[in-house]
Image (cartoon, rainbow, N blue to C red):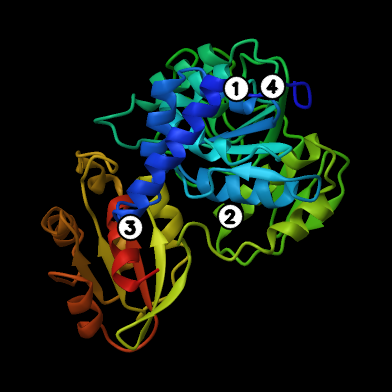
Amino acid sequence: MAGNTEPLSPRAKLAVTAGRAAAAVSRAAGRGSGSVIGGRVALKLDPDLLGRLAQHLDVILVSATNGKTTTTRLIAEALRAAGPVVSNALGANMPAGITSALAGGSDAKYGVIEVDEKYLAGVARDTTPKVIALLNLSRDQLDRAAETRMLAEKWREGLSGSKAVIVANADDPLIVWAASSSPNVVWVAAGQAWKDDAWSCPSCGGVMQRPGDDWFCGECGFRRPTPSWVLHGDYVLDPHGSAWPIHLQLPGRANKANATSSAAVAAVFGVPPQVALERMYQVQAVAGRYDVVSFLGRELRLLLAKNPAGWLETFSLIDPPPTPVILSVNARGADGTDTSWLWDVDYTQLAGHPIFVLGDRKLDLAVRLEVAGLDFRVCENLDEAVQQAPPGRIEVIANYTAFQDLRRRVGN
């Protein structure tokens, strides 16, 4: 329990020290933040370190296919109204990165932790969270992660009987199926723009009926639960029916949905919606996402989109034509090496935009755009794309490692 903890053992202290040293060496060598290698070294010396570091914290876990880094940041900001917070704010969301983050939180009250979907059950077992926020599940990295229904089943099994409060999106059938094994669920109507992974019932395999915002299975009766928290336009409706305005610097409906789930999490710890939402306004960008930067005399907005659902949400954010758009796609280990997901994205929504294509898999993307009937140019690098783009702010959309490449190039 938080507040009832024993000091770290000599072994755990040694593991933390060794992990910090490894991270420092990695940073000095220019290989990133060092959080992952630091956590790996620490866990090698003390395999139980993650649990030891979490024992004095009220832990909140956040998992989803899309939006978990942003939601983690919003929850962390909201909970700072109630006490110090430690968080893996840069998105290192597997056990090693989480361990590194918690190692820096000895004085914290709350641990707000983003968790990769594949590792959620294991991290929940190790950290005994007070709250687990489940936002959405859709196809992503199918060469690495399980098919979405299988992943929902693993979550359901791993969270069965959990003592944590589960804050779950009532609009995603896969999330509802995963959360329904838990005795204490707070349902949030956060919406679901991408529905192509939720047409079959996760309970029986039958065809889902989806009239309006509702959904149900006509064969087994599995259906959308009644939400306690609701995103309604620019307002959050709390369980008492009070409406609280959402004022964010982050763009788009998806981030209002993230804020709604974050307000529901904060309320578990006694932070009122008004206070939580006011604190969320301070968040301008999240690990480079949504940043506007100057490069080669042009203004670029950096947007991350890693899978079909993420690209759909991102298309709704960008300025209308004739705003130039740069698209960059890689297929490295952190992205998933299978690019077949490109064919699930409706790129026709970019019609009218001047489009410039780059990245390791620029030719895969070019074929997809050709089939969609769009005009585009293939470029060797960001510099060439920016120099060819017509006037105006440029929207730059990239998947994970392509996004990191671009951030390094623009010095962000």
- Tell me: residue 397, above or below residue 4: below
Circle number at residue 52: 1
Query: Could you tell me which quadrant the C terminus lies in?
Result: bottom left
Q: CA distance from mark 1 to mark 4?
A: 18 Å
- Tell me: residue 222, above or below residue 258: above
Which residue is denoted by mark 4 in the rendering? Answer: 164
Q: Nearer the viewer, residue 184 or 271?
A: 271
Label 3, secondary structure: give it. helix
Which residue is denoted by mark 2 in the rendering? Answer: 255
Callout 1 touching callout 4 (CB < 8 Å):
no
Query: Could you tell me which quadrant the N terminus lies in?
Result: top right
Callout 2 touching callout 3 (CB < 8 Å):
no
Label 1, secondary structure: give it. helix
Callout 1 touching callout 2 (CB < 8 Å):
no
Q: Which callout, 1 or 4, points at the residue further toward the start of the chain?
A: 1
Which residue is denoted by mark 3 in the rendering? Answer: 404
* Eye-nearest disc, 1 or 4: 1
Q: In the figure, residue 213 lies in which quadrant?
A: top right
- The amino acid on which the numbered mark 2 sits, given as a three-letter code, is Asn
Q: CA distance from mark 3 to mark 1?
A: 32 Å
* Eye-nearest disc, 1 or 2: 1
Count neighbours of disc 1 (C-alpha within 10 A) and say few if under 14, some if 14 to 19, many if 20 or more: many
Residue 122: x %, y % from top left: 49, 19
- The amino acid on which the numbered mark 1 sits, given as a three-letter code, is Arg
Q: CA distance from mark 1 to mark 2?
A: 33 Å
Residue 345: x %, y % from top left: 31, 50
* Left or right placement of residue 269 versus residue 162 in this view: right
Q: Which callout, 4 or 2, points at the residue further toward the start of the chain?
A: 4
* Eye-nearest disc, 4 or 2: 4
- The amino acid on which the numbered mark 3 sits, given as a three-letter code, is Gln
Count neighbours of disc 3 (C-alpha within 10 A) and say few if under 14, some if 14 to 19, many if 20 or more: some
